[in-house]
Image (cartoon, rainbow, N blue to C red):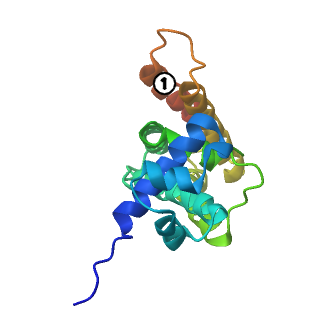
Amino acid sequence: MPRPRTHDEALRLKLLDRAGELISADGPKALSLRKLAADSGTSTTAVYSLFGSKPDLVNALYAEGFRRFGARLATVSRTGDPVTDLVRLGIAYRESALADPHLYAIMFTRSVPGFEPNTEADEVARATLKPLAETVRDAVSSGQFQDVAPEVITVSLWGIVHGLVTLELSGRLPEGFDVAAAYEKALQVNASGWLR
């Protein structure tokens, strides 16, 4: 009878979430493989078996953040109305960030000095922006949006979403600010501004 596998996907995800929490709370120096293993109720052997090394662990953490992010964006079906679609994608972006704030900084900042994603992780990250880029490209080519380079519109839309979410996650918004309502309105006005 084969020995049961103990280093499974559930443990891998548990380790990734805990690693993200450690970095998010106390910075990259807090990520000790020994502490990570102890906090997760496993051994350092399991961490090495699943990830290889500390840089490989950070790479997996980065890729996992974008995998979850991409999965949320992929659930947004297109309606044919680019403003509606872009607002819905922006809402999914925020929901993803709020669901996994411990991964957000690793995905979008240089929270781990010297970290550069490997080619595979970088491809996962780039793929997550496809729904946004495709929606914009289709709106420009169909004449719904102004005849502006789609990349300009895409980065503009991403910038406002990312900026608002980052302000929210860092606690930099005014006290009592209705984030959800203001966020949706800001997305709608920004996307509508590109209409022809």
Percent x, y of residue 80: 41, 50
- Name the residue nearer the viewer: 143 or 33: 33
Closest to the observer: 194 or 49? 49
Q: Quadrant of residue 119?
A: bottom right
Quarter placement of the N terminus: bottom left
Side of 87 relative to 118 (left or right): left
**As drawn, which residue projects farthest toward the right?**
114
Which residue appears farthest toward the bottom when viewing the image? Answer: 1
In the image, residue 17 sits, relative to residue 8, either above or below, namely above
- Type of amino acid at the residue the image marks with label 1: Lys
For the residue pair 176 and 77, the one nearer the viewer reads as 176
Q: Position of residue 84 (x, y in %)?
A: 43, 39
Dot 1 alpha-carbon crowd within 10 angstroms: few under 14, some 14 to 19, many 20 or more: few
Q: 3 above or below 45?
A: below
Left or right: where 152 falls relative to 64: right
**Which residue appears at 45% of the width and 43% of the height?**
96
Please tell me in which quadrant of the rendered image residue 10 appears. bottom left
Rendering coords of residue 159 (x, y %):
65, 38
Residue at x-position 60% and y-position 51%: 32
Dot 1: what SS? helix
